[in-house]
Image (cartoon, rainbow, N blue to C red):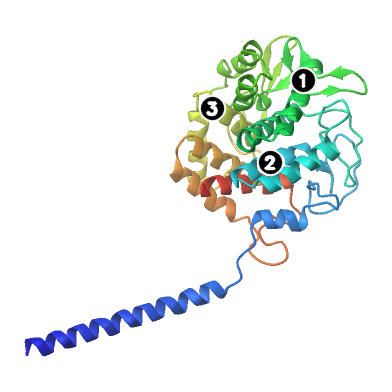
Amino acid sequence: MRTLSSRRARVMISILIIAVLGVAIFFTARYMMRPAIPSTAQFMDNYMRNANGTIASYLQAEPSTDPNIVAGREALSESVGIWMQYNLLQDDSTSFHETYELLTTYFLSPQHYIRWKLEEDGTSRVSTYALGDDLRIVGALLDAYDRWQQPEYLNTAKQITDTLWQHGLNNGYLVDYYDFQHRTSADQLSLTYIDTAVLEQMQKVGLADAAQVDKHLQLLRQIPNDGLFYPRLYQVSDGTYMYDKEVNLIDQLIIGLHLTELKQPPQKLVDFMKQQFQQDGKLYGRYHAADHTRAVDYESPAVYGLAILLALQMNDREWADQLYTRMTAFRTADGPYAGGYVSDGNTHAFDDLQALLAETSLQH
């Protein structure tokens, strides 16, 4: 009897296992047959590329009314640098080199400065660079050279940095821009542009000396705050830090990322963001410096993307995951623009790129 019962039990268990496996295979097959949501990278390649391959600033075309203001399908050096960073995260040497070719073909001027903005067709009406974008690109080129040993990456990084040191100094500091047409330079340095990691990379390969790097990093090491927010600018003429009355959270996060690289994480800023997120379920794009209340009603995927990168730098994966859930709520799930952060038929490349960078960093 025991033998018969045991056999029956084994048969029933076998039937149960087969049934469970059958259900699992059925639902797995159904899931695999569903069309996958295109990635943000696919959206960028499908809809945010101009005919020449440059990344458009906006999805929708719009004529430019001011050469100093970005509009429509104009392309930015900012996008080049972030896309290079994404290529590095993906270990995609082919895409990185394609981006490098766009840089040297369209953005890099004969004087070896990077034009900060191009028209849709690749021509340019500007004669200045944007320091923060240049340093981001230099950092990506140095990382790529270190990884793939392509001498041209190091050579181009040297050309760009030589131009910065030759033309971009004011009172001993690199400043936001130099105008090669009018031969004038800014008298201020945006603190978001002091890219700690890149400056240290430059020193390591001989593109900057220790004194030059330390002079700039000291501005961050000694940066004041108003109790919560950091100043946005440093006035090189009189050595003063300048605050905004209406604070852009993107600026605060970028400064926070660089401070974390210096082992000075912006804990008060993070605590404030967590408190706001717990209270409102969201982070707004701007806050009043005086009373820390929101100054706008909108949210920004770029804010969430940068906050995720900061959370990862500070080894706070739980916070990063919470931010990611909110960020991807703005990502288009279906339709022609699936994968993009499209609202009211338009999107800004910076939002998509920062979100893509954050998502890829989380995956890695």
Apparent side of residue 222 relative to residue 335 in the rendered image (left or right)? left
Q: How far is the residue under mark 2 from the one under mark 3? A: 20 Å
Give amino acid for label 3. Answer: Glu
Query: Label 1, on which residue?
Result: 162
Q: Position of residue 325 (x, y in %)?
A: 53, 53
Q: Residues within 10 Å of mark 3 (few under 14, many from 20)?
A: some
Query: Label 3, on which residue?
Result: 261
Q: Quadrant of residue 240?
A: top right
Kindly identify which numbered label has been placed on residue 84: 2
Q: Position of residue 221 (x, y in %)?
A: 56, 17
Residue at 64% x, 44% y is 86
Do the residues under discs 3 and 1 have CB atoms within 8 angstroms? Answer: no
Give amino acid for label 2. Answer: Met
Do the residues under discs 2 and 1 have CB atoms within 8 angstroms? Answer: no
Apparent side of residue 222 relative to residue 344 in the rendered image (left or right)? left
Res 313 visible: yes
SS at circle 1: helix
Depth order, front residue of 305/290: 305
The first of marks 2 and 1 along the sequence is: 2
The first of marks 2 and 3 along the sequence is: 2
Residue at 57% x, 75% y is 33
